Amino acid sequence: MQNPDEFANIIKELRIKKGLSQQQLAEQMMVSRSAVSMWELGSRVPDINMLGRLADCLGVERRILLDAIQSDPGENVNIIVVEDIPMLLHSAVRLIESELPEVNIAGFESGAEALDYARLNRVSVAFLDIELDDEMNGLELANKLLEIYPHTNIIFLTNFADYMTQAIYDHCSGYILKPLSRERVRHELANLRFPVRGLES
């Protein structure tokens, strides 16, 4: 199912993030400025060949743009939890499941596993432990998740307040000091940076 509104929002956000005007993007794409304008208004979407060129100009994978065009507004919401201590991971997953029984919740002990999942499933919300016993920490994992889908809401879980400045600088959606509580989950889900259909209060 085509969803030009979702595509339009992502194209505009990526263009601005790259520091390009509509005219500059049009010149790189070798199309008219009005073509770019129509994409961002949702009145037209590019064909598959043009989509590859657009992805290159915006510095993203073609699949991200293709997913945006084909996304179904009623699709299932996916939330992930990444925590390297199994007991804490299971506890967090159960708590979030109890709050959102109709939502897909997936837990991972490593960032690599989470990224594999995110490449195949659009992640709307990611609860990430910062100090992962892994090749990447939670801050690095957050950046990689946002490369896959720029509208992922990142909520950090940590025992330390030290990372809060960096989290704010990176425009995360939320920051929870452990232990995770039902009240904090509710608060963060009610104040997501990128609203998620199906999670509205």
Image (cartoon, rainbow, N blue to C red):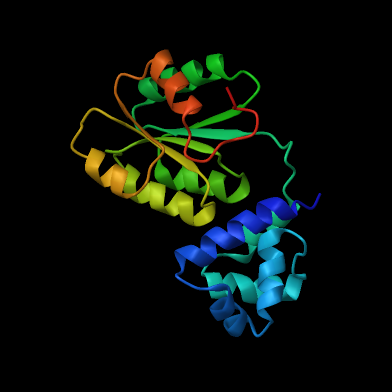
Report whether 132 appears left or right of 19.
left
Q: Between residues 46 and 34, which one lies in front from this camera angle?
A: 34
Q: Is residue 67 visible?
A: no
Does 92 sit above or below residue 55?
above
Query: Residue 149 appears at what percent x and percent y?
Result: 54, 51
Q: Residue at (55%, 46%) from the top-left corner?
A: 118
Q: Between residues 191 and 116, which one lies in front from this camera angle?
A: 191
Does 136 sit above or below residue 11?
above
Query: Residue 165 appears at what percent x and percent y?
Result: 23, 43
Q: Between residues 151 and 126, which one lies in front from this camera angle?
A: 151
Q: Residue at (20%, 32%) from the top-left corner?
A: 161
Query: Residue 57 appears at what percent x and percent y?
Result: 55, 75
Report whether 68 appears left or right of 90.
right
Q: Residue at (41%, 14%) from the top-left corner?
A: 183
Query: Residue 8 appears at what percent x and percent y?
Result: 66, 58
Q: Could you say which quadrant of the image residue 50 lies in?
A: bottom right
